[in-house]
Amino acid sequence: MRIVTLGPTGSYSHRVAQAVDGDPDDEIGFRETKTDIVAAVADGDYDRGVVPIENSIEGGVTESLDALADHDVAVVQEVVTPINHALIAQGDSFDTVASHPQALAQCRDYLAEHYPDAAQEAVASTARGVEIAREDETVAAIAHPDNAGDDLAVLAEEIQDRASNATRFFVIAPPAARTEAGGKSTFVVYPGTDYPGLLLRLLEPFAERDVNLTRVESRPSGERLGDYVFHIDVEAGRYEQRTDEAVAELEALSPDGWVRWLGSYDVEHVV
């Protein structure tokens, strides 16, 4: 299987990608952005893609959400993994900390307390920060401790501001892989209109059928200011009659817009 995710080797996304199929012969490719990952799967260049969707500290990963709204792909699995951030460097003397913006934000309090004078450099992934730290002794990285070794040492572990730090990833596939089976489903809804009580009306079809919503998030549509796309996750498969009925109501409420079902899937926890 050909899988694409955020690189380089050693990123949290890469760790999840290795667990998707479990086959050591899988070919894992890398892209620098979540948008490029989703596009590569939509174009048929890869069988699967892995993108972060939500972090327990920093919330939704907006680039991933926007890419899923803009490309026709299927969500076939959710993977949840705990995040163990470590400070990694060649030595104690550094003046810059480089990592993914989310990782820097997740360690905000630690950095403010222990390295208030260090500059923070946002890079494409935690693993990219490790590469920079390996080349430059004045730079430390925030990444999984397994990225240390060779010329890099772990200066501190579990430096995230909350011990419960975890990230949800979506495993995406070409549209033909979309399935109705699974305990969760994800939808993207563009109502194409706006009026008082609109969001309530969009959510009522699920509440009336006792379908639990696990995430509701709005993103700008890009069409005009104040125009939004809604991302909705529910604890029900599309194979269930109650889900199908709720979606039919959503579509009726969005005659000038659209409702996209990304897929139904199960959740796996990976350490």
Image: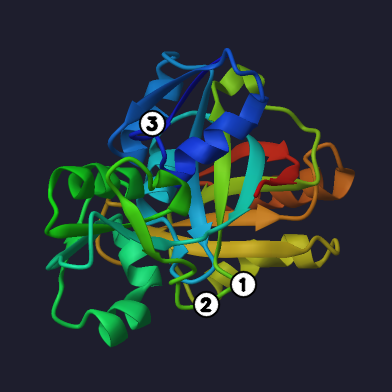
Q: Earlier in the sequence, mark 3 or mark 1?
A: 3
Judging by the rendered image, the residue that carries numbered circle 3 is 37
| Local crowd size for mark 1, using a 10 Å CA cut-off: few (<14), some (14–19), many (≥20) | few
Q: Is residue 122 left or right of residue 84?
A: left
Judging by the rendered image, the residue that carries numbered circle 1 is 200
Q: Label 3, label 1: how many angstroms apart (C-alpha)?
A: 33 Å
Colour pattern of the rendering: rainbow
Q: Is residue 74 left or right of residue 138?
A: right
Res. 227 visible in picture: no
On the image, the x and y values in percent for residue 125 come to: 32, 47
Considering the numbered disc 1 on the image, is that residue within a helix, a strand or a loop? helix
Q: Is residue 246 above or below residue 131?
A: below
Q: Is residue 248 left or right of residue 152?
A: right
Residue under the point 45% across and 23% down: 41
Q: Name the image quarter holding residue 109.
A: bottom left
Image mark for residue 162: 2
| Local crowd size for mark 2, using a 10 Å CA cut-off: few (<14), some (14–19), many (≥20) | some
Image mark for residue 251: none
Q: Label 1, label 2: how many angstroms apart (C-alpha)?
A: 32 Å
> Residue at the bottom extreme?
113
Q: Is residue 221 above or below residue 240?
A: below
Q: Label 3, label 2: how many angstroms apart (C-alpha)?
A: 29 Å
Considering the numbered disc 2 on the image, is that residue within a helix, a strand or a loop? loop
Residue under the point 32% across and 30% down: 31
**Image quadrant containing the N terminus:** top right
Residue under the point 25% across and 64% down: 225
Res. 224 visible in picture: yes
Between disc 1 and disc 2, the foreground one is 2
Q: Is residue 197 left or right of residue 178?
A: left
Q: Earlier in the sequence, mark 1 or mark 2?
A: 2
Between disc 3 and disc 2, the foreground one is 2
Q: What amino acid type should be assigned to the residue bearing mark 2?
A: Arg
